[in-house]
Image (tube, rainbow, N blue to C red):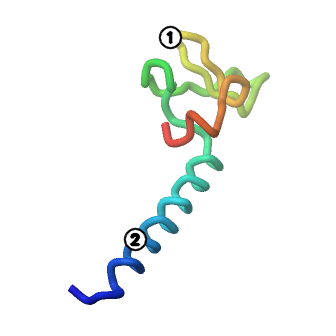
Amino acid sequence: MAGGTLGWDLYSTLVQQAEYVEYYKSVPPVACPNDGEPLQPGPSAHSGILYCPWDGWQWPRDYDPETQAGY
């Protein structure tokens, strides 16, 4: 094992993780954070809304990207 390689590997892993976090904060979720059910599109009058048919959770109304990103 080379002496300086370990530090760069850790740094590149942290950079990649930060990129993943930003990506998942920017895309809509695909599953409900409460029960894991796939989200359904809202009615045509409310386009752009995703909701959980089981508990009524809605995106973007109930979405907190700091705690729920990546679902």
Residue that appears at 35% across and 87% down:
4
Residue that appears at 65% across and 22% down:
58
Q: Is 16 above or below relative to 64?
A: below
Q: Residue furthest top?
A: 55
Q: Is 10 above or below relative to 21?
A: below
Q: Is 26 above or below relative to 8?
A: above
Q: How many marks?
A: 2
Viewport quadrant of the N terminus:
bottom left
Q: Position of residue 11 (x, y in %)?
A: 46, 73
Amino acid type, mark 2: Leu
Residue at label 1?
54
Residue at label 2?
10
Residue that appears at 45% across and 74% down:
12
* Quarter of the image where one finds residue 64: top right
Query: Element under label 2?
Result: helix
**Which tag, 2 or 1, sits closer to the chain's start?**
2
Residue that appears at 50% across and 10% down:
54
Q: Position of residue 42 (x, y in %)?
A: 66, 23
Query: Element under label 1?
Result: loop
For disc 2, the neighbor class at 10 Å (few under 14, some 14 to 19, many from 20) is: few
Judged by depth in the image, the label closer to the viewer, 2 or 1, is: 2
Q: Position of residue 20 (x, y in %)?
A: 52, 57
| Foreground residue among 31 and 44 | 31
For disc 1, the neighbor class at 10 Å (few under 14, some 14 to 19, many from 20) is: few
C-alpha gap between disc 2 and disc 1: 41 Å
* Quarter of the image where one finds residue 8: bottom left
Q: Is residue 48 left or right of residue 20?
A: right
Q: Which mark is residue 12?
A: none
Amino acid type, mark 1: Trp
Q: Is residue 8 left or right of residue 6?
A: right
